Image (cartoon, grey):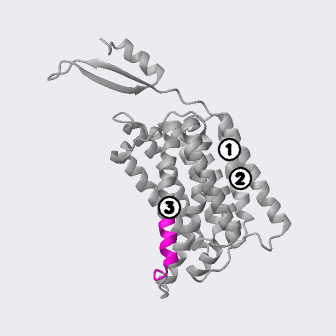
Amino acid sequence: MYSSNLTGFVLAVVSSAFIGSSFIIKKKGLQLARVNGPRASVGGYGYLLQPLWWVGMITMIVGEISNFIAYIYAPAVLVTPLGALSIIVSAVLAHFLLKEKLQKMGILGCLLCIVGSTVIVIHAPEEMSLSSVQEIWELATQPAFLSYTASAMAVTLVLVLYCAPRYGQTNILVYIGICSIIGSLTVMSIKAIGIAIKLTLDGANQFLYFQTWIFTMVAITCVIVQLNYLNMALDNFNTAVVSPIYYALFTAFTILASAIMFKDYSGQSISSIVSELCGFITVLSGTTVLHSTREPDPPVITVSWYIQGNSDPWKQKEEDVSPLNLIAIIRQDHFK
């Protein structure tokens, strides 16, 4: 038992290291992509041609696979809290590699996020036993969860159609809010797919039922939306802030969706529910402290000038630069 838990612990730590690093690698890829095309925050998809961005995606996938395997060897109460280590990894790497300075109060905010997440997991209720995809389908089509799904989609549409064009590049909660709300639906769908795969490997083929394929389509759609808006968030805001806020909101909405769909808190004691509430307050406090102490990103200015080429006498060139870099360009006589 000790050896099994140790294996799960090591896999969970490795998972956090990979996932935390993936935020930094993907951001570096986004920075390279914006040099040769429009930014991801304004609808550009040049990052898909950047090998470094794909390295970040592969790193994230490896981390998620490690996390999945960790649950095989160790209990969830040991593995799940260690996922918060990815926040520390990304914040520290961003401080040294991306020059996104992490204030002392920001470090305190990260610690509060980890403490709150640990409290939530320790007092988390047990999951109900499910034996088929049809059972999950019945839970997903109950009035309470249908109401949550409709509300989540309505809020997401408001954020995408109204808030994102107006406030997306100035308010960090817009893009992350979209990722978190959609993420809760992603987890519910992936849970159904996981059960289908497990039952299929045990001999009961679940891919004969249409419900399995509906969950698969929902999961794929939600993952694509999450990745798109997560890239926009990383392209506009400090990684040290994006990671913990995304972690906190994603965890909150996922637990809420799970509580509604699977009735997790049915039969829970008052002390456990209060402890869960205290954990949420601690996490939200940590994200608030971290967000309030972050240094704002310098504004980006698009400048264009004409340069003399070999074959073409004059050629126009455009580049996104910060005010400090713009001064350096002027000093280097780029505009002559």
Name the residue tied to disc 1: 287
**Left or right: 74 with respect to 226?**
right
Q: How crowded is mark 1: few (under 14 residues within 10 Å), some or many (20 or more)?
A: many
| The image quarter in which residue 301 lies | top left
Name the residue tied to disc 2: 115
Q: In the image, which residues are magenta?
A: 207-219
- Under mark 2, the amino acid is Val
Marks 3,2: beta carbons within 8 A: no
Image coords of residue 312 (percent x, y): 17, 22
**Screen quadrant of the N terminus:** bottom right
Residue depicted at 78% across the width and 72% down the height: 266
- Under mark 3, the amino acid is Glu
Does residue 243 appear anywhere in the picture?
A: no
Does residue 181 appear anywhere in the picture?
A: yes
- Under mark 1, the amino acid is Thr
Image coords of residue 244 (percent x, y): 61, 47
* Residue 260 in the image: above or below residue 208: above
Residue depicted at 47% across the width and 63% down the height: 220
Q: Is residue 162 magenta?
A: no
Which type of secondary structure does the marked residue at label 1 adopt?
helix
**Screen quadrant of the C terminus:** top left
Marks 3 and 1 sit apart, C-alpha to C-alpha, by 23 Å
Q: Residues within 10 Å of mark 2 (few under 14, many from 20)?
A: some
Name the residue tied to disc 3: 64
Marks 1 and 2 sit apart, C-alpha to C-alpha, by 12 Å
